[in-house]
Image (tube, rainbow, N blue to C red):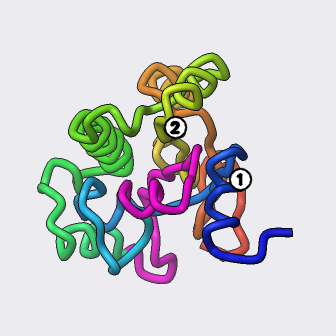
Amino acid sequence: MASTMRDVLELHRRWCVADSHADSLMWNRDLCVRSDDGHVDFPRLHEVGMKLQCFTLVTRGFPVVDGFEAFAALRGWPAEARASEWSRALWQIEKLEAFCGRSEGRVAVTTSARGLEENLARGRLSAVLGVEGAHALEGRVERVAELHARGVRFIGLTHLANNDAGGSSFPL
């Protein structure tokens, strides 16, 4: 049994520690910079020995009054990224790709088991993309293939509101 923080961190270096959910992209922060504010960032993930982090794309929120567009404006998203749920998803994918590109080879979007194994061998953090709610598809099932081509590997059917794929715990 690990008795010190050093022992715990050593275990993390040997194990494939993964986190299946972070909404970091919606906050429009620089994930390459360590911060004590908000969700995870690359430096803190490396500090704790994280090997795989799922980054979720959030395109809808605040179900009583769909205030996500206002939220995104307050967080500094460009107007074109706020135009629709689809554009919100694409913008967040592009942000993660840019952060990975600036990570000096320490983080890579991972789309396969082979990619995960390669990243583990190189000591790189694997970033896995997912979508919170099929709202981002805007009723167009063919967009699943486009998201897959862009690196998305999972989609939650609903998130805070009903959509064409299903009903949520909120009645809207």
Instruction: Give whichever of 68, 17 is nearer the camera.
Output: 17
Asked whether residue 65 is drawn in magenta, I would say: yes
Percent position of residue 11, x then y: 71, 55
Asked whether residue 6 is drawn in magenta, I would say: no
Residue at x 18%, y 60% (from the top left corner): 77
> Residue 158 appears in which quarter of the rendering?
bottom right
Residue 49, placed above or below residue 51: below
Q: Are the residues tagged 1 and 2 within 8 Å (C-beta)?
A: no
Residue 48, placed above or below residue 136: below
Q: Which residue is labeled 2 in the image? A: 126
Percent position of residue 7, x then y: 69, 65
Residue 129, placed above or below residue 60: above
Q: Quadrant of the N terminus?
A: bottom right
Residue at x 33%, y 47% (from the top left corner): 92
Residue at x 27%, y 44% (from the top left corner): 99
Per the rendering, the mark at residue 59 is none
Distance of label 1 from label 2 (alpha carbons): 30 Å
Outermost residue, right side = 1
Q: Secondary structure at mark 1?
A: loop
Per the rendering, the mark at residue 166 is 1
Amino acid beneath label 1: Gly
> Residue 114 appears in which quarter of the rendering?
top right
Q: Which residues lie in the magenta part?
A: 41-66
Residue at x 21%, y 39% (from the top left corner): 102
Instruction: Give whichever of 13, 134 is nearer the camera.
Output: 13
Percent position of residue 160, x then y: 59, 69
Percent position of residue 136, x then y: 46, 46
